[in-house]
Image (spheres, rainbow, N blue to C red):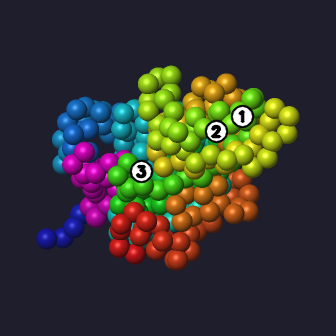
């Protein structure tokens, strides 16, 4: 039977969500059945609904997602996200997104940002069309250290370092795992910290500093798992090397 024009690009909705690295296909079924997924502004309750990733707009929990095109081959990029840039595929407020920093030919491949860096943070961000890798890298069961350099103002002292290293409890009640923390330099009331995190608690560093009466002046992610930012300038990107891709996939127990 002949395939209708454009039919090859159609995807089941649950597979499209999984390819975007949001969650597993089974979890996507649950999100869809719970009424938390919309296609072109309409809530969809059928996981088997077919969508065209080239034209249909999919939103999960109110946030638009980028669905990689099927059968296009995977692409992997490392971006130095600058401050005042949103880590999403699009922004209803019209702010600059990380995808806006990429050339048109790469945007057309629909790479997905892996995890997030908040609006006023900068540093290493992976973008890829590899949904399996995205899901593994963002799932709590796959430990991948993230290293940050954080410039703060305030009286940190040995007590503050010990609290971070011991595993503090945030004022909202979140119990944090111990953080590797060291002072790279200190001058007056300002310090540059190196923090190594293994968790993925939302805005963890800023909330930790808040509870220790520290003001974050600059927050930069410098490495994630086997990847390092190096001297890549803010707003610039580069493709991952084959060796980096192999190391990254191995780090989350995927075949290299």
Relative vertical location of residue 41 with respect to residue 198 in this rendering, above or below:
above
Specify whether residue 14 is painted magenta.
yes
Sequence-first disc among 3 and 2 = 3
Specify whether residue 90 is painted magenta.
no
Residue at 52 percent of width and 77 percent of height: 243
Res. 104 visible in picture: no
Per the image, the residue denoted by label 1 is 157
Look at the image and give the residue range highlighted in magenta: 7-27
Sequence-first disc among 1 and 3 = 3
Circles 2, 1 touching at the beta carbon (< 8 Å): yes
227 sits left or right of 150 in the view: left
Q: Nearer the viewer, residue 189 or 25?
A: 189
163 sits left or right of 192 in the view: left
Residue at 56 percent of width and 42 percent of height: 165
Residue at 72 percent of width and 46 percent of height: 183
Where residue 236 sits, quadrant-wise, is bottom right
Binning the other alpha carbons within 10 Å of mark 3 as few (below 14), some (14 to 19) or many (20 upward) gives: some
Image spot of residue 146 (x, y percent): 55, 52
Per the image, the residue denoted by label 3 is 138
Residue sitting farthest toward the top: 171
Per the image, the residue denoted by label 2 is 161
Q: Determine the main secondary structure of the stretch shown in magenta.
A: helix
């Amino acid at each position: 039977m002949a395939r209708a024009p454009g039919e090859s690009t159609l995807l089941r909705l649950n597979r499209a969500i999984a390819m975007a690295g949001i969650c597993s296909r089974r979890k996507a079924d649950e999100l869809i059945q719970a009424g938390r997924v919309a296609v072109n502004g309409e809530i969809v309750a059928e996981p088997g609904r077919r969508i065209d990733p080239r034209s249909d707009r999919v939103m999960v929990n109110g946030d638009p997602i980028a669905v990689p095109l099927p059968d296009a081959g995977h692409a992997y990029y490392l971006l130095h996200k600058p401050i005042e840039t949103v880590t999403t595929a699009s922004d209803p407020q019209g702010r600059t997104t990380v995808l806006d920093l990429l050339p048109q030919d790469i945007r057309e491949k629909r790479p997905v940002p892996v995890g997030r860096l908040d609006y006023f943070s900068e540093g290493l961000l992976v973008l890829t069309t590899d949904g399996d890798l995205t899901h593994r890298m963002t799932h709590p069961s796959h430990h991948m250290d993230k290293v940050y350099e954080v410039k703060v103002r305030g009286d940190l002292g040995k007590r503050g370092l010990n609290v971070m290293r011991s595993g503090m409890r945030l004022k909202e009640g979140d119990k944090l795992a111990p953080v590797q923390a060291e002072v790279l330099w200190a001058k007056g009331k300002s310090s540059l910290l190196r923090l190594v995190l293994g968790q993925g608690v939302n805005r963890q560093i800023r909330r930790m500093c808040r509870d220790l009466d520290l003001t974050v002046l600059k927050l930069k992610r410098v490495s994630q798992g086997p990847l390092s930012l190096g001297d890549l300038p803010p707003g610039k990107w580069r493709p991952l090397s084959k060796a980096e891709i192999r190391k990254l996939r191995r780090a989350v127990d995927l075949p290299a």
